[in-house]
Amino acid sequence: MHHAIAAWLTQRPWHAAVAAAFCGALSLQMPMPFMVLAGAIPVLVMLRADWRQALPVAATSAAAAIWIVVTLGEMVPGLIAGLLVLIVGPALLAALLKRTGSLNLCFQIAASVVALAVIGVYLALSDPTAIWVELLRRALDSMEAAGLHFGGDTEAMIAIWARTMWGALAALSMTTVLGALFLGCWWQTLLDAPGRFGAEYRKLRLGLVLGLAVTVLFVTAFLSDSGLVASLAWVAFAALSFQGLAAAHRSKAGGKLNRGWLAAIYVLLVVPLSMSVTVLVLAIWGFADNWLRPRAQTV
């Protein structure tokens, strides 16, 4: 099915533009899967053609999403900027991938840029958590008005959530951008070189420099109560979970992991009750894989 989708999207230039606009328009109402699809389509066009064709496709997708925001009366500059990053970001990574041929480099750069963005937020805002305190308070008030009541000290709960919301948002954004990049890259290899994406994905690795940075970050997180460190830890966990998933695929390709277990991992990742635990396990696996896997090992 995915081969047919990729073939149709690249058959005519307007196919990709129309599909991207449709997915962009639905990306706010149903972020998964439409936000990922809105970014993956320009990636496919970038890898199969060039930026001259990919840029208009990304523009139509972003324009459709922004149009929905405008019609709803939500003229929030931050929201519009976020949409542009989520839709155009994957295409920029695809351009880098086309130039360098390294999917792992794109992965490392995405993680680094997102981490730097979080640091930038904390440097630019005098009180980064204050924004989220008010938003979370409104959200809880709306839930209570709808009949959903939370026991305990809600103010303490809001303070805990607000402390890491920038990190959670950054981790979710990175996951969306990388998901779009990987999907678009997979589509392209289905048409041009079946199996190549899997081989590249199984090589994902943070590497020595980022691995050391993450290790120092985790040690600091245990010793510090810093909101910045906690937010960066979210980004690190998200990046490591991608490497853990790559390690799972490598184990399956090497015959060490049953296909059913790999399918179970994906099911657990989309079930809300098990998602956080699964991400944690994958992150631990990814952390161990980053230090224990021989550098030359590939499957």
Image (spheres, rainbow, N blue to C red):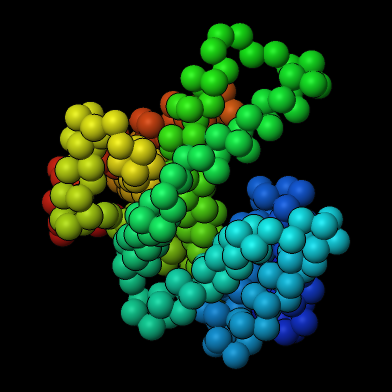
Total number of numbered discs in the rendering? 0
Residue 212 vs residue 108: left or right? Answer: left
Task: Reply above or below: 127 against 110.
Answer: above
Q: Is residue 283 visible?
A: no
Q: Residue at x 64, y 75 (%)?
A: 58
Give residue 21's quadrant in the image.
bottom right
Query: Residue 111, position in %: x, y?
Result: 36, 57
- The front one of 283 and 233 is 233
253 up-or-down from 92: above or below: above
> Left of 296 or right of it: where is 286?
right
Give the left or right position of residue 24, taking residue 130 as reference.
Answer: right
The x, y position of residue 214, in whole percent, is 23, 46
Residue under the image location 51 percent in, 46 percent down: 169
Res. 42 visible in picture? yes
Q: Quadrant of residue 231?
A: top left
Residue 273 at what x, y percent from top left?
56, 23
Viewer-proximal residue among 28 and 298:
28
The residue depicted at 45 percent of the width and 46 percent of the height is 128
Is 262 placed above or below 175 here?
above
Q: Nearer the viewer, residue 100 or 130?
A: 130
